[in-house]
Image (tube, helix red, strand yellow):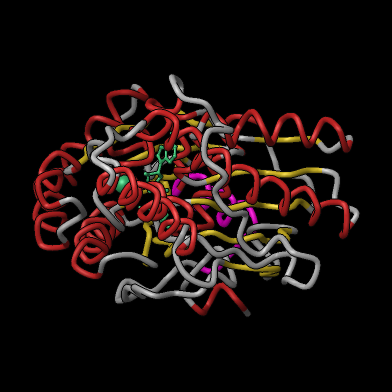
Amino acid sequence: PVVLGIESSCDETGAGLVRDGKLLGHAVASSMDEHARFGGVVPEIAARAHVHAAAPVVHAALADAGLTMADIGAVAVTTGPGLSGALQVGVAAAKGFAYSLGVPLYGVHHLAGHVAADTLEHGPLPDPCMVLIISGGHTSLLLVRDLARDPIVHLGDTLDDAAGECFDKVARVFGLPYPGGPAVDRAAREGDARAVAFPRPLTGPRDDPYAFSFSGLKTAAARWAEQHRQAGRELPVADGAASLQEAVADVLTRKAVAACVEHGVGTLVVVGGVAANSRVRSLAEERCAARGIALRVPPLRLCTDNGAMIAAVGDLLVRAGAEPAPLDVSIDPSAPLEYAALHPVARV
Ligand code: ATP
Ligand code: MG
Ligand code: FE
């Protein structure tokens, strides 16, 4: 069947249509501009924007695919983690579509969606594969087997800030526009990555090889900027951005490749919004090639939040014969990533 996926966990309203692992069409609306003057996502504004965007985005995805409502055979929706008000809107919309069309509903973990995004471009994931999830709210190394059936093994997470959060916060300190990640990436093009010796947190011999920490890096960047200000010197933003980006990309790719080597896993999949970063991509390529590891990174449009990735998980669940969610399935704003499907019935 054609699976409709709906995503509304943060500031993007996404809808996508997937059948048998193939992306048929998708559409995304973002309330990003409405949050810009606050310097971060405002939950109430995001939720209200989802209310306005949900139906139009589903219709746009259908138009993109050349399909109609009647073609939809199942609905998948992000039930967590994310902002509760935002999640509620997407889940309510998904329930409405599933109930009115008389098709099954699946509740999907947002991060499983980020992982599955890559299958839409590069086909089924090999079993096992190493997944580096780097987004606005998460930084994790995962050992993934069959995404639809098996539990996901967490090798490590960030102890404090996520990689995307680090980019976003440092961008503010550097006076770069919102959202910070893409702005740092752009500014870094004109800068020297060796200009500032930012630390490489948790890369010492006694550190947890799979844990991450980015709050110290954020502090180091802020201190560097402050020193320039106090001395009355203009901030060399491009050099700072390039050096910060180099430090983040270095730590992320070093640990991810080491995890592949340690676990004898031949494929690294890098997903989430920060996988859009140009230096993360190039350094991952370089280091995977040196170790004979196959690297998979979704195309940019599938890296950040979208509905196609949620439809991709729904499609995997349908084909694995997973139990659908009950129509009264609730959101889980802080759901841990254990299984791709969030409703407990799929776990038995
Ligand atoms: P989560 O998926 O953890 O719930 P999220 O959905 O907000 O968080 P994503 O949409 O996956 O996160 O990614 C957004 C993050 O990606 C932001 O922090 C943004 O700054 C970052 N990002 C996007 N493009 C780039 C880039 N080119 N370089 C660095 N960071 C980037
Ligand atoms: Mg977003
Ligand atoms: Fe996300």
> Image quarter for residue 10?
bottom left
Give the number of marks: 0
Q: Position of residue 5 (x, y in %)?
A: 39, 47
- Of 301 and 340, the residue lying toward us: 301
Residue 270 lies, with reference to residue 204, above or below; the image says: above
Q: Position of residue 322 (x, y in %)?
A: 58, 64
Task: Name the side, left or right, on which 254 lies relative to 298.
Answer: right
Task: Name the side, left or right, on which 146 lies relative to 214.
Answer: right
> Image quarter for residue 15?
top left
- Of 262 and 12, the residue lying toward us: 262
Residue 62 lies, with reference to residue 15, above or below; the image says: above
Q: Position of residue 292 (x, y in %)?
A: 89, 35
Q: At 87% from the left edge and 59% from the top edge, which residue is drawn?
A: 263
Task: Name the side, left or right, on which 240 lies relative to 248.
Answer: left
Q: At 47% from the left edge and 66% from the top edge, which residue is drawn?
A: 324
User: Which segment did they paint magenta?
Assistant: 310-323
Q: Is residue 30 magenta?
A: no
The answer to whether one can see residue 72 in this image is: no
- Of 97 and 347, the residue lying toward us: 347
Principal secondary structure, stretch drawn in magenta: helix
Q: Position of residue 127 (x, y in %)?
A: 80, 52
Q: Is residue 320 magenta?
A: yes
- Of 8 and 348, the residue lying toward us: 8
The answer to whether one can see residue 57 in this image is: yes
Q: At 67% from the left edge and 61% from the top edge, which residue is drawn?
A: 142
> Image quarter for residue 305?
top left
Q: At 64% from the left edge and 28% from the top edge, which residue is drawn?
A: 282
Residue 143 lies, with reference to residue 26, above or below; the image says: below
Q: Quadrant of the C terminus?
A: bottom right
